Image (cartoon, helix red, strand yellow):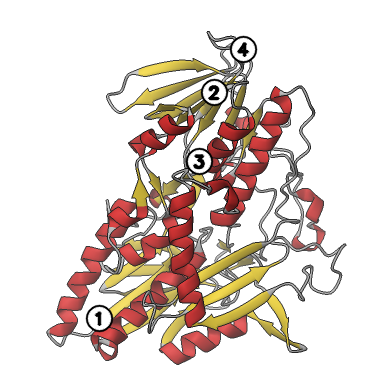
Amino acid sequence: MSTSSGLPKIIILGAGFAGHTAALHLSDLVKGSAEISVVAPRNRFTWFPSLIWVGTGTMSAEQTWFELQPVYEKIGIHYFDARAEEIAPDAQTVTIRYADDHTETLAYDYLLNATGPYLNFEGTPGLGPKVGATQSVCSVEHALGARDAYTTSLDQMRKGKRQKIVIGVGHPAATCEGAAFEYIMNVHWDLQRRGLRDKADLVWLTNEPEAGDFGVDGIEAKKGGVMVTGAGMVRMLFDEAGIKPIIAAGVSAVHGDSISYDVVGGDPSEMNFDFAMLIPQFRGIPMKYVAADGTDISAKMTLPNGFMRVDAEYAPKTYDEYKASDWPALYRSPYYANLYAAGIAFAPPHPISRGKKTANGMVVQATPPRTGMASGIMGRAVAQNIADQVAGREPSHHARMSEMPAACIASMGKSLLSGSAASIVMVPIVRDFERYPETGRDVGLCDLDVGLAGAWTKRLLHEAFMWKLQAKPGWQMIPE
């Protein structure tokens, strides 16, 4: 199948870290030899790591996003401001729906599903800004709502009314604990600078099996011959900040201004709050897959959570049976050689962290994060693999999470004078005990540090990537 120009057609669904990065690289890799289209709603790329600052009112929303259309026009990519609704991999078509509710069917030769997460607020009764009183920082609109609710709490504190602030995750299988950690540390810092810290009780509510797990099974690093851990670092930071951690907890419901949760090793509990920011569970974007005869094959193409199957090992295993080779290398469908999924859209073969079960049988399990640097690396690898196929070669670019490194700068205050950040490097993200028998990682390359330098790095990354992702001159020189 080819376009009216006779060139093969590449379609990318989604314009987040994975999808937009893939689009940028493909614009270079297949220039003149394929047509590229991106399908994504709202005509907007959002730099999600900075939404924690929007949510505390220390950065404007406008600084975190830009319009996609001008960028794609500049680099020769067709843009459809719409959502993907149905993929027919045998027919090699995708049906998209526009904001005015009309649909269109597009043909493709190669397709990348990088649609990102569906925010499953309804997975926890009463959770979220639409139906409840809890906030989120998972979108620009959510971060603005969190900012407004936080501002209301600030007003109450100024009047002398003590506020209980609960921050963390709102589902026993949620992910992105790192973003929630940044948010609570920025709230702590912001309250300090306003002289209101003594008017607030800060509570960290998380499904992690221990503090500093972040859904990646924690981290260790060797510094000066001494092994340090992320768990120790986070516990120290919480102690210094006067933050109360509730670990290995799964939120079961939100009722007005109270949160019900089950905790491993304890009894079901409930606590009131004045302000709460709780990350929801992520699921795959609702999308139908159909066979040539019109049969719904979604159950074959995806896991029950809606994320797309790729070249991973999905056989059920216990934690001790997990292998680095379980993780996908190409991010290609096992059924269709021209269909890929990357970023949050691909289905991880299993968790990275250990899950735990409460006395009531609730499984409390931090889900693997697949955002930021990891998504960008995946997007680039898929772009290279599609370019290989366009050129008649077999795809050869691997980006296993059990091979790739990750660097994370967790903000703990935005100021370049008084702010701070936790700098975390892990190699690789997913532990590989065959290569590194003791810890599963190269602890000599891993790193943990806290200080003002991290705050500068965090802000520089914001500026560098906003430059890169708008395809400004020299963007190719800024790594994922």
Residue type for callout 3: His
Q: CA distance from mark 3 to mark 4?
A: 29 Å
* Mark 4 / mark 2, whichever is N-terminal: 2
Location of residue 25 (image quadrant): top right
Q: Residue at x 43, y 51 (%)?
A: 123
Which residue is tagged 2?
87
Are there few (<14), some (14-19), or many (20+) residues within 10 Å of tag 3? Answer: many
Front residue of 265 and 239: 239
Q: CA distance from mark 3 to mark 2?
A: 20 Å
Q: Which disc number belongs to residue 45?
A: none
* Of labels 3 and 4, the one closer to you: 3
Element type at marker 2? Answer: strand
Front residue of 257 and 174: 174
Are there few (<14), some (14-19), or many (20+) residues within 10 Å of tag 1? Answer: some
Residue type for callout 1: Gln
Residue 332 visible? The answer is: no
Which residue is tagged 3?
20
Q: CA distance from mark 4 to mark 2?
A: 11 Å
* Of labels 3 and 1, the one closer to you: 3
Where residue 297 appears, x then y in whole percent? 61, 24
Are there few (<14), some (14-19), or many (20+) residues within 10 Å of tag 2? Answer: many
* Of labels 1 and 2, the one closer to you: 2
Q: CA distance from mark 3 to mark 1?
A: 40 Å
Q: Residue at x 35, y 59 (%)?
A: 136
Which residue is tagged 1?
163
Where residue 274 appears, x then y in whole percent? 25, 74
* Mark 1 / mark 2, whichever is N-terminal: 2
